Amino acid sequence: MKTRKVSIIGAGNVGASLGQRLIEKDFVDVVLVDIVEGLPQGKALDILQSGPIIGFSHRISGTNKFADTAESDIVVITSGIARKPGMTREDLLRINSGIVSTVSKEVSFFSPNSTIIVVANPVDAMTWVAHQASGFSRNRTIGLSGVLDSARLASFIALELSVSPSSVSCPVLGEHGANMVVFPRFAKINGKPITELLSKEKVEELTQRAINGGAEIVGLLKTSSAFYAPSAATARMVEAILADTKEELPCATVLLGEYGIENTVIGVPVRLGKGGIQEIINLELTPTELKTLQQSAESVRRQILSIPTV
Ligand code: NAD
Protein backbone atom coordinates (compact mmCIF):
# COMPACT_ATOMS: atom_id res chain seq x y z
CA MET A 1 0.00 0.00 0.00
CA LYS A 2 1.21 3.51 -0.83
CA THR A 3 2.53 5.36 2.23
CA ARG A 4 0.10 8.06 3.16
CA LYS A 5 1.29 11.64 3.08
CA VAL A 6 0.28 14.70 5.09
CA SER A 7 1.65 18.08 4.04
CA ILE A 8 1.64 20.94 6.51
CA ILE A 9 1.79 24.44 5.06
CA GLY A 10 3.46 26.80 7.53
CA ALA A 11 6.28 25.33 9.63
CA GLY A 12 5.74 27.73 12.53
CA ASN A 13 4.57 26.81 16.00
CA VAL A 14 1.38 24.92 15.12
CA GLY A 15 2.76 23.40 11.90
CA ALA A 16 6.01 22.04 13.35
CA SER A 17 4.30 20.80 16.51
CA LEU A 18 1.72 18.99 14.36
CA GLY A 19 4.51 17.50 12.25
CA GLN A 20 6.13 16.12 15.40
CA ARG A 21 2.84 14.71 16.73
CA LEU A 22 2.02 12.97 13.44
CA ILE A 23 5.46 11.50 12.81
CA GLU A 24 5.64 10.17 16.36
CA LYS A 25 2.43 8.21 15.69
CA ASP A 26 4.32 6.59 12.79
CA PHE A 27 1.46 6.16 10.35
CA VAL A 28 2.13 8.84 7.69
CA ASP A 29 4.99 10.61 5.92
CA VAL A 30 5.01 14.33 6.67
CA VAL A 31 6.13 17.28 4.53
CA LEU A 32 6.62 20.68 6.16
CA VAL A 33 6.39 23.69 3.82
CA ASP A 34 7.23 27.31 4.55
CA ILE A 35 8.22 30.44 2.66
CA VAL A 36 11.15 31.03 5.00
CA GLU A 37 14.23 29.35 3.54
CA GLY A 38 15.79 26.73 5.80
CA LEU A 39 13.02 26.84 8.41
CA PRO A 40 10.99 23.79 7.32
CA GLN A 41 14.17 21.90 6.34
CA GLY A 42 15.82 22.58 9.70
CA LYS A 43 12.78 21.67 11.78
CA ALA A 44 12.09 18.52 9.75
CA LEU A 45 15.71 17.39 10.07
CA ASP A 46 15.66 17.95 13.82
CA ILE A 47 12.42 15.95 14.19
CA LEU A 48 13.73 13.20 11.86
CA GLN A 49 16.78 12.74 14.09
CA SER A 50 14.49 11.89 17.02
CA GLY A 51 13.35 8.78 15.09
CA PRO A 52 15.92 6.35 16.51
CA ILE A 53 15.05 7.54 20.02
CA ILE A 54 11.26 7.64 19.72
CA GLY A 55 11.15 4.64 17.38
CA PHE A 56 9.33 5.87 14.27
CA SER A 57 10.27 4.90 10.74
CA HIS A 58 8.10 7.18 8.58
CA ARG A 59 9.77 10.17 6.92
CA ILE A 60 9.49 13.86 7.64
CA SER A 61 11.02 16.41 5.27
CA GLY A 62 11.02 20.17 4.86
CA THR A 63 10.78 22.25 1.70
CA ASN A 64 10.06 25.67 0.20
CA LYS A 65 8.63 24.10 -2.96
CA PHE A 66 4.94 23.31 -3.21
CA ALA A 67 5.63 20.62 -5.80
CA ASP A 68 7.06 18.46 -2.99
CA THR A 69 3.55 18.20 -1.50
CA ALA A 70 2.25 16.42 -4.63
CA GLU A 71 -0.24 13.58 -4.09
CA SER A 72 -0.82 14.37 -0.42
CA ASP A 73 -3.77 12.69 1.27
CA ILE A 74 -4.28 15.63 3.62
CA VAL A 75 -2.96 19.18 3.48
CA VAL A 76 -3.11 21.23 6.67
CA ILE A 77 -2.98 25.00 6.18
CA THR A 78 -1.41 26.77 9.15
CA SER A 79 0.20 29.51 7.06
CA GLY A 80 -1.08 32.84 8.19
CA ILE A 81 -0.01 35.74 10.30
CA ALA A 82 -1.20 36.57 13.79
CA ARG A 83 -2.80 39.95 14.45
CA LYS A 84 -0.12 42.50 15.37
CA PRO A 85 -0.55 45.76 17.32
CA GLY A 86 -2.17 48.42 15.13
CA MET A 87 -3.62 45.84 12.74
CA THR A 88 -7.40 45.75 12.36
CA ARG A 89 -9.42 42.54 12.05
CA GLU A 90 -10.09 43.57 8.44
CA ASP A 91 -6.33 43.82 7.77
CA LEU A 92 -5.84 40.33 9.18
CA LEU A 93 -8.74 38.98 7.15
CA ARG A 94 -7.33 40.47 3.95
CA ILE A 95 -3.74 39.27 4.48
CA ASN A 96 -4.62 35.74 5.62
CA SER A 97 -7.29 35.25 2.96
CA GLY A 98 -4.63 36.13 0.35
CA ILE A 99 -2.26 33.52 1.81
CA VAL A 100 -4.95 30.82 2.24
CA SER A 101 -6.33 31.44 -1.24
CA THR A 102 -2.91 31.12 -2.93
CA VAL A 103 -2.06 28.01 -0.93
CA SER A 104 -5.45 26.37 -1.62
CA LYS A 105 -4.97 26.82 -5.38
CA GLU A 106 -1.59 25.09 -5.10
CA VAL A 107 -3.22 22.27 -3.13
CA SER A 108 -5.87 21.70 -5.78
CA PHE A 109 -3.16 21.63 -8.48
CA PHE A 110 -0.68 19.30 -6.75
CA SER A 111 -3.05 17.18 -4.61
CA PRO A 112 -6.43 17.26 -6.34
CA ASN A 113 -7.77 14.33 -4.31
CA SER A 114 -6.66 15.55 -0.90
CA THR A 115 -8.65 16.84 2.04
CA ILE A 116 -7.78 20.30 3.35
CA ILE A 117 -7.78 21.08 7.06
CA VAL A 118 -7.59 24.82 7.69
CA VAL A 119 -6.02 26.09 10.91
CA ALA A 120 -5.12 29.70 9.98
CA ASN A 121 -7.33 32.32 11.61
CA PRO A 122 -9.98 33.60 11.46
CA VAL A 123 -10.56 29.93 10.78
CA ASP A 124 -14.24 29.93 9.82
CA ALA A 125 -13.76 32.58 7.12
CA MET A 126 -10.46 30.95 6.05
CA THR A 127 -12.25 27.60 5.60
CA TRP A 128 -14.66 29.37 3.27
CA VAL A 129 -11.73 30.87 1.34
CA ALA A 130 -10.08 27.43 1.04
CA HIS A 131 -13.36 25.91 -0.17
CA GLN A 132 -13.79 28.61 -2.83
CA ALA A 133 -10.17 28.80 -3.98
CA SER A 134 -9.53 25.04 -4.13
CA GLY A 135 -12.85 24.21 -5.75
CA PHE A 136 -13.00 21.19 -3.41
CA SER A 137 -16.34 19.96 -2.14
CA ARG A 138 -17.28 21.05 1.35
CA ASN A 139 -16.62 17.50 2.57
CA ARG A 140 -12.95 18.04 1.80
CA THR A 141 -12.49 21.54 3.26
CA ILE A 142 -12.71 21.47 7.03
CA GLY A 143 -11.53 23.88 9.70
CA LEU A 144 -10.07 23.37 13.17
CA SER A 145 -12.32 24.93 15.79
CA GLY A 146 -14.59 22.79 17.96
CA VAL A 147 -12.11 19.96 18.59
CA LEU A 148 -9.80 22.52 20.23
CA ASP A 149 -12.50 24.61 21.93
CA SER A 150 -14.21 21.50 23.32
CA ALA A 151 -10.89 20.20 24.64
CA ARG A 152 -10.30 23.51 26.39
CA LEU A 153 -13.70 23.40 28.06
CA ALA A 154 -13.35 19.69 28.88
CA SER A 155 -10.01 20.27 30.58
CA PHE A 156 -11.45 23.06 32.76
CA ILE A 157 -14.48 20.89 33.70
CA ALA A 158 -12.19 17.95 34.50
CA LEU A 159 -9.97 20.15 36.68
CA GLU A 160 -13.01 21.53 38.52
CA LEU A 161 -14.55 18.11 39.21
CA SER A 162 -11.30 16.12 39.53
CA VAL A 163 -12.38 13.65 36.88
CA SER A 164 -10.52 12.24 33.90
CA PRO A 165 -10.63 14.69 30.95
CA SER A 166 -11.53 11.80 28.65
CA SER A 167 -14.77 11.23 30.60
CA VAL A 168 -15.98 14.73 29.64
CA SER A 169 -17.82 15.39 26.40
CA CYS A 170 -18.91 18.94 25.60
CA PRO A 171 -19.21 19.91 21.94
CA VAL A 172 -18.42 23.59 21.36
CA LEU A 173 -20.15 24.95 18.28
CA GLY A 174 -20.45 28.17 16.26
CA GLU A 175 -17.73 30.63 15.33
CA HIS A 176 -14.20 29.99 16.65
CA GLY A 177 -13.69 33.07 18.79
CA ALA A 178 -15.78 35.39 20.87
CA ASN A 179 -19.03 34.08 19.37
CA MET A 180 -18.46 30.40 20.05
CA VAL A 181 -21.51 28.58 21.32
CA VAL A 182 -21.83 26.22 24.29
CA PHE A 183 -25.11 24.53 25.12
CA PRO A 184 -24.53 23.22 28.67
CA ARG A 185 -27.20 20.54 28.33
CA PHE A 186 -24.99 18.74 25.79
CA ALA A 187 -21.99 18.75 28.17
CA LYS A 188 -21.73 15.41 29.97
CA ILE A 189 -19.44 13.40 32.22
CA ASN A 190 -19.77 9.69 31.55
CA GLY A 191 -23.19 10.47 30.12
CA LYS A 192 -24.37 12.57 33.11
CA PRO A 193 -25.20 16.23 32.28
CA ILE A 194 -22.77 18.68 33.95
CA THR A 195 -25.79 20.83 34.82
CA GLU A 196 -26.49 18.18 37.52
CA LEU A 197 -22.92 18.37 38.83
CA LEU A 198 -22.03 22.07 38.66
CA SER A 199 -23.92 25.27 39.44
CA LYS A 200 -25.16 27.46 36.60
CA GLU A 201 -22.64 30.13 37.66
CA LYS A 202 -19.73 27.67 37.61
CA VAL A 203 -20.72 26.38 34.16
CA GLU A 204 -20.85 29.98 32.93
CA GLU A 205 -17.44 30.75 34.46
CA LEU A 206 -15.78 27.70 32.86
CA THR A 207 -17.46 28.42 29.53
CA GLN A 208 -16.14 31.99 29.56
CA ARG A 209 -12.65 30.70 30.32
CA ALA A 210 -12.88 28.35 27.33
CA ILE A 211 -14.11 31.21 25.10
CA ASN A 212 -11.08 33.26 26.21
CA GLY A 213 -8.84 30.16 26.05
CA GLY A 214 -6.68 31.43 23.20
CA ALA A 215 -6.39 34.97 24.59
CA GLU A 216 -5.43 33.69 28.05
CA ILE A 217 -2.46 31.85 26.51
CA VAL A 218 -1.42 34.81 24.33
CA GLY A 219 -1.49 36.93 27.50
CA LEU A 220 0.96 34.56 29.15
CA LEU A 221 3.24 33.84 26.18
CA LYS A 222 3.14 37.48 24.97
CA THR A 223 4.89 36.91 21.64
CA SER A 224 3.07 33.86 20.27
CA SER A 225 -0.20 32.01 20.56
CA ALA A 226 -1.23 28.50 21.58
CA PHE A 227 0.11 25.57 19.64
CA TYR A 228 0.32 22.42 21.78
CA ALA A 229 -3.45 21.89 22.10
CA PRO A 230 -4.14 23.21 18.56
CA SER A 231 -1.66 20.72 17.08
CA ALA A 232 -3.12 17.88 19.18
CA ALA A 233 -6.64 18.79 17.98
CA THR A 234 -5.52 18.89 14.34
CA ALA A 235 -3.72 15.53 14.69
CA ARG A 236 -6.98 14.05 15.99
CA MET A 237 -8.80 15.28 12.86
CA VAL A 238 -6.07 13.90 10.58
CA GLU A 239 -6.27 10.51 12.29
CA ALA A 240 -10.08 10.42 12.14
CA ILE A 241 -9.94 10.96 8.37
CA LEU A 242 -7.05 8.62 7.54
CA ALA A 243 -8.12 5.84 9.90
CA ASP A 244 -11.75 6.29 8.80
CA THR A 245 -12.90 6.33 12.44
CA LYS A 246 -16.26 7.96 11.58
CA GLU A 247 -16.19 9.74 14.94
CA GLU A 248 -18.41 12.70 15.69
CA LEU A 249 -16.31 15.83 16.12
CA PRO A 250 -17.26 19.50 16.06
CA CYS A 251 -15.52 21.09 13.05
CA ALA A 252 -15.73 24.32 11.07
CA THR A 253 -17.95 23.25 8.17
CA VAL A 254 -19.46 24.93 5.12
CA LEU A 255 -23.22 24.95 5.72
CA LEU A 256 -25.69 24.94 2.85
CA GLY A 257 -29.01 25.21 4.64
CA GLU A 258 -28.35 23.00 7.69
CA TYR A 259 -29.55 24.71 10.89
CA GLY A 260 -31.15 27.32 8.62
CA ILE A 261 -27.64 28.62 7.80
CA GLU A 262 -26.58 29.10 4.21
CA ASN A 263 -23.25 29.81 2.48
CA THR A 264 -21.24 30.29 5.59
CA VAL A 265 -18.94 28.32 7.88
CA ILE A 266 -19.33 27.56 11.57
CA GLY A 267 -18.49 24.72 13.88
CA VAL A 268 -21.10 21.95 13.98
CA PRO A 269 -20.78 18.25 14.84
CA VAL A 270 -19.77 16.18 11.83
CA ARG A 271 -18.80 12.58 11.22
CA LEU A 272 -15.16 12.49 10.12
CA GLY A 273 -13.70 9.60 8.18
CA LYS A 274 -12.42 8.59 4.76
CA GLY A 275 -13.01 11.46 2.35
CA GLY A 276 -13.41 14.06 5.11
CA ILE A 277 -16.88 14.98 6.33
CA GLN A 278 -19.16 11.98 5.86
CA GLU A 279 -22.21 13.48 7.55
CA ILE A 280 -23.29 16.75 9.11
CA ILE A 281 -25.03 15.88 12.39
CA ASN A 282 -28.33 17.59 12.88
CA LEU A 283 -28.69 18.34 16.62
CA GLU A 284 -32.22 18.84 17.89
CA LEU A 285 -32.04 22.44 19.09
CA THR A 286 -34.65 24.55 20.84
CA PRO A 287 -35.73 27.72 18.96
CA THR A 288 -33.56 29.82 21.34
CA GLU A 289 -30.52 27.60 20.81
CA LEU A 290 -31.02 27.67 17.05
CA LYS A 291 -31.17 31.47 17.13
CA THR A 292 -27.91 31.63 19.12
CA LEU A 293 -26.18 29.42 16.53
CA GLN A 294 -27.56 31.49 13.65
CA GLN A 295 -26.33 34.72 15.28
CA SER A 296 -22.86 33.20 15.58
CA ALA A 297 -23.01 32.30 11.87
CA GLU A 298 -24.09 35.85 11.03
CA SER A 299 -20.81 37.16 12.45
CA VAL A 300 -18.82 34.83 10.14
CA ARG A 301 -21.05 35.70 7.19
CA ARG A 302 -20.16 39.40 7.63
CA GLN A 303 -16.46 38.51 7.53
CA ILE A 304 -16.93 36.40 4.41
CA LEU A 305 -18.74 39.23 2.63
CA SER A 306 -15.88 41.63 3.43
CA ILE A 307 -13.19 39.38 1.88
CA PRO A 308 -11.98 40.45 -1.56
CA THR A 309 -12.85 37.86 -4.24
CA VAL A 310 -10.68 34.75 -3.89
P1 NAD B 1 3.51 30.99 13.23
O1 NAD B 1 3.73 32.43 12.92
O2 NAD B 1 4.38 30.33 14.24
O3 NAD B 1 3.60 30.13 11.86
C1 NAD B 1 3.05 30.52 10.66
C2 NAD B 1 4.05 30.12 9.57
O4 NAD B 1 3.42 30.29 8.30
C3 NAD B 1 5.32 30.95 9.54
O5 NAD B 1 6.46 30.12 9.69
C4 NAD B 1 5.29 31.64 8.17
O6 NAD B 1 6.57 31.82 7.60
C5 NAD B 1 4.45 30.66 7.38
N1 NAD B 1 3.87 31.21 6.15
C6 NAD B 1 3.31 32.44 5.94
N2 NAD B 1 2.90 32.54 4.66
C7 NAD B 1 3.16 31.37 4.06
C8 NAD B 1 2.95 30.85 2.75
N3 NAD B 1 2.37 31.58 1.80
N4 NAD B 1 3.35 29.58 2.48
C9 NAD B 1 3.96 28.83 3.44
N5 NAD B 1 4.18 29.27 4.69
C10 NAD B 1 3.80 30.52 5.00
O7 NAD B 1 1.98 30.87 13.65
P2 NAD B 1 1.28 29.66 14.41
O8 NAD B 1 1.29 29.90 15.87
O9 NAD B 1 1.82 28.39 13.89
O10 NAD B 1 -0.23 29.87 13.94
C11 NAD B 1 -0.57 29.71 12.56
C12 NAD B 1 -2.00 30.16 12.29
O11 NAD B 1 -2.90 29.28 12.96
C13 NAD B 1 -2.33 31.58 12.79
O12 NAD B 1 -3.22 32.20 11.87
C14 NAD B 1 -3.07 31.30 14.11
O13 NAD B 1 -3.92 32.36 14.48
C15 NAD B 1 -3.83 30.05 13.72
N6 NAD B 1 -4.31 29.22 14.82
C16 NAD B 1 -5.58 28.74 14.72
C17 NAD B 1 -6.11 27.90 15.68
C18 NAD B 1 -7.49 27.35 15.52
O14 NAD B 1 -8.06 26.85 16.49
N7 NAD B 1 -8.07 27.37 14.33
C19 NAD B 1 -5.32 27.57 16.80
C20 NAD B 1 -4.02 28.06 16.88
C21 NAD B 1 -3.51 28.88 15.86
Image: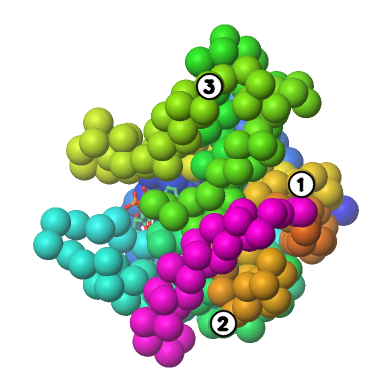
Answer with left or right where residue 140 lies relative to residue 53: right
Answer with left or right where residue 244 lies relative to residue 29: right
Q: CA distance from mark 3 to mark 2?
A: 44 Å
Residue 11 pos. (x, y %): 42, 52
| The residue at label 3 has a CB less than 8 Å from ligand 1 | no
Going 62% across and 13% down the picture, which residue do you hit? Answer: 163
Going 67% across and 72% down the picture, which residue do you hit? Answer: 260
Range drawn in magenta: 283-310
Residue 280 pos. (x, y %): 76, 61
Going 39% across and 52% down the picture, which residue do you hit? Answer: 178
Residue 124 pos. (x, y %): 50, 64
Q: Amino acid at mark 3?
A: Ser
Q: CA distance from mark 3 to mark 1?
A: 27 Å
Q: Quadrant of ligand 1?
A: bottom left
How many numbered marks, from 0 up? 3
Label 2: state its secondary structure: helix
> Mark 3 highlights which residue?
199
251 and 195: which is toward the camera: 195
Answer with left or right where residue 233 lies relative to residue 72: left
Q: Amino acid at mark 1?
A: Glu
- The quarter in which the C terminus is drawn is bottom left
Is the image coloured rainbow, by chain, by secondary structure, or in one colour?
A: rainbow
Q: CA distance from mark 1 to mark 2?
A: 25 Å
Of pointers 3 and 2, the one earlier in the residue sequence: 2
- Residue 262 in the magenta stretch? The answer is no
- Residue 288 in the magenta stretch? The answer is yes
> Mark 1 highlights which residue?
248
Which quadrant of the structure image shows residue 192? top right
Majority SS type along the magenta span: helix
User: Which residue appears farthest toward the right when viewing the image?
Assistant: 1
User: Which residue appears farthest toward the front when viewing the image?
Assistant: 287
> Mark 2 highlights which residue?
132
